[in-house]
Image (cartoon, grey):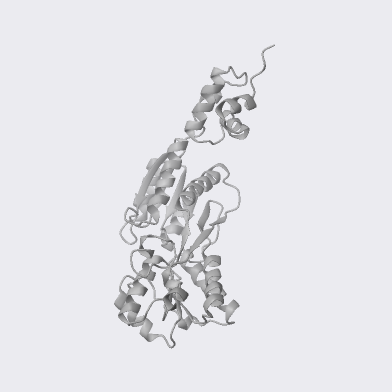
Amino acid sequence: MKKAVTIKSIAEQLNLSRNTVAKALNGQYVPEATRELVLKKAQEMNYKSLNASNLELGGKKYRILLVAGKPLINMSYFIPLVKSIENSCYERNYELFQYTYTVNRTPFSSFAEYVKELNVDGIVAIECFDRQFVSKMINMGKPICFVDFTAGNLQLNKNYDIISANDEKSICEIVKFIHSKYGTKHFTFVGDPTHCLSFNERHVGMRMGMLLVTGSHSVGRDILCANESFDYGNPDAIKTEILKLKYKPECFICCNDFVARNVCNALKSLNMRIPQDVMVVGFDNVTDSTSMSPEITSFSVDKEFLGSETLRTLVNRIEHPDVPSRIITVSTTRILRESTNRISHNA
């Protein structure tokens, strides 16, 4: 008697797991190339449970809109993230559209009309921090996944989720690490904590670390100028703020690598050696962290994973609109470089 064709036998022929083959045959998500391979082999082997619905490539074809609060093409952090979203959409045969808005220059009505014309199923929002724009976008009722979020106290609703790096814990841990290794007590945060959720949590993380290692921290010891009125890309402006500090910082915790690089330039103009006189920490591990000497200690996020997880979270929101909103954190990797390696420089 001829042996019956099973999911296990198909999996063995393709050197795939039974779970992967089962997902492909049951219409669940697997990469499109894998799905086609499984269906072709199942046909060849005359798998009895194969029917017309199995042979339809993919399930629901969603229309996804990627909304950016600024042009992302020149931002090295977002290029691999966006590419990952594009690849994930391609694998699932989703349609992907992109829209860039500029605060005070793009009427929300234009954006709303664009969304209506496209009839999108869900929205990925990147660098969208303007509270008024975000609030109006949420009120449209479309499923949304935000990569980072506003720092304001917007309440979680049912139609959106937030995904970001594990900012607070990462910074808290490096404060504890630097204190333990060098006895460092005076940390200064540089950046606007009201700009976005990630900057706010990085500032909170530093304060938490300080409370754990020294028992206190005054925000008056930080440089927290508002982005709207201060140019963090100008080392001379940062130099002026450093000179205003009431005490000598031992380590600057910066909101990102771009700010960290300019803090380093400001310190050099003050004839302060890095890391011998003062240490510097950034975040995001982009080219700014390694584009100068000394190279800057930073935190790396798997941007490809962040992109695919963003799309997965959005699709889950589309398919399960009534589940509670979530804030999903992605772990980071600490990358120690010259800007905090005081021992080797003093050797």
Q: Residue at x 46, y 81 (%)?
A: 250
Q: Residue furthest bottom?
A: 246
Eyeballing the image, is 344 above or below 330?
below
Which of the two residues, 105 or 185, is positioned nearer the viewer here? 185
Residue 15 rendering spot, x and y as whole percentages = 57, 30
Answer with the quarter of the image where residue 216 lies. Answer: bottom right
User: Residue pushed farthest top?
Assistant: 1
In front of the other: 194 or 322: 194
Name the residue nearer the viewer: 342 or 245: 342
The quadrant in which the N terminus is found is top right
How far from the left and from the top, in percent, is residue 279? 43, 76
Q: Is residue 72 visible?
A: yes
The quadrant in which residue 19 appears is top right
Residue 116 placement (x, y as % from top left)? 40, 44
Residue 253 visible somewhere in the drawing: no
6 left or right of 105 in image: right
Q: Which residue is at the far front?
A: 347
Rendered location of residue 229, percent (x, y):
34, 74
In this picture, is 232 found above or below 66? below
Q: Image height check: is 176 above or below 155? A: below
Left or right for 102, reference 338: left
